[in-house]
Amino acid sequence: MSQWRWKAGIGDGATLSIIALFSISALLPFYWMVVTSLKTANELFSLGFPLWVFHPTWGNYIGLFNLTPFGHWFLNSALVSTGATVIALGFGSLAAYGLSRMPSKLSIAIVQMTLLTYLIPRAVFVVPLYSLLHTLHLLDNLLGLTLAYLSFTLPFTIWLLISFFQTIPKELDEAALIDGCSRIGVLARVVLPLAAPGIVATGIYSFSTAWNEFMYPLALVQTQTRTVLTVGIASLRQADIFAWGQIMAAGTVGAIPVMIFYAFIYRRIVGGLVAGSVKG
């Protein structure tokens, strides 16, 4: 018995060590970014200890908000990412519900094509989207950028929600239809409430993907005050001069919304992933 406990203790210790190692590797870059954002210019380029700040200052944050249109970048990112996520969830729920309730060779082909669309590199769509938005007079426009984001948020949403909807028995749909509900009513009153964890998980992942997008806003938006956070942070580099303090401050502020979402809704995310992995 003592030997078994000894082996179990070693196994638990090894598991905790691996978890701690991965946690440190994941948190260290963010910690380094926060520490760097609080350093003065002299301390930033000194040969001191890089993982600690001896003379913290808010100067980088003050300069970021006073000398750059950071507020516009942040607001634009929030509007575009939220809009793309809400639209993708709305249309994606309708498409995923229809495909999950009508199994056939055609629906399987549509699902495969949807997944293929998501896997195609986004760089392939830049020129067609540029031409399309220019024709629709939506170039250099937040609405046009939101619609462009749907090219990757919508296929991902449809593909992921199908697995969640397939876990809900079709008998519930039939019972609701007998009671007088329409198909839209079944989706709104029965399917969506039961698939809420999966919808939340899908929405968070779609939002974080849209929030971190760089290529589309770089190509489709030219006005500095209309661009988003990722492109705005990249613009803080002037030639070969990097404003590292402001760049790290902008990265810290930009990471806060997604971190807040994950911190407060992580239980629903885990529940949604578990629900989507089991079909019944």
Image: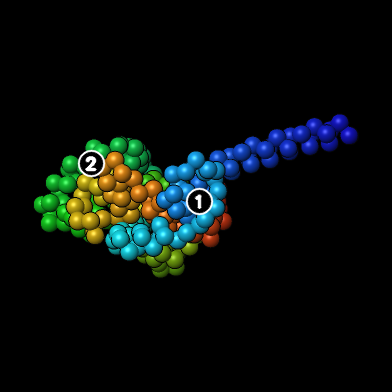
Residue pointed to by mark 1: 35
Q: To which residue does mark 2 refer?
A: 125
Q: How is the image coloured?
A: rainbow
Q: Is residue 192 at all visible to an observer of this figure?
A: no
> Is 33 placed above or below 19 here?
below
Left or right: where does residue 126 sit relative to residue 91? Answer: left
Disc nearest the viewer among 1 and 2: 1
Q: Viewed as shown, does residue 51 lie left or right of 162?
A: right
- 110 relative to 201, above or below: above
> Which residue occupies the foreground of this view, 67 or 274?
67
> Which three-letter amino acid code belongs to the residue tagged 1?
Val
When the figure is inspected, residue 221 is found, relative to residue 103, above or below; the finding is below
Of the numbered discs 1 and 2, the one sitting upstream in the chain is 1
Name the side, left or right, on which 266 lies relative to 186. Answer: right
Q: Relative to the observer, which residue lies in front, 77 or 187?
A: 77
Q: Position of residue 226 (x, y in %)?
A: 23, 59
Q: Determine the secondary structure under disc 2.
A: helix
Outermost bottom residue = 180
Q: Nearer the viewer, residue 169 or 40?
A: 40
Q: Which quadrant holds the N terminus?
A: top right
Q: Residues within 10 Å of mark 1 (few under 14, many from 20)?
A: many
Residue 87 x/y as whole percent: 32, 58
At a point 47% along the width and 43% down the height, the residue shown is 46
Residue at left 58%, top 39%? Answer: 22
Give the residue type at disc 2: Phe
Residue at the location (31% across, 50% down)? 236
Q: Viewed as shown, does residue 235 lie left or right of 223? A: right
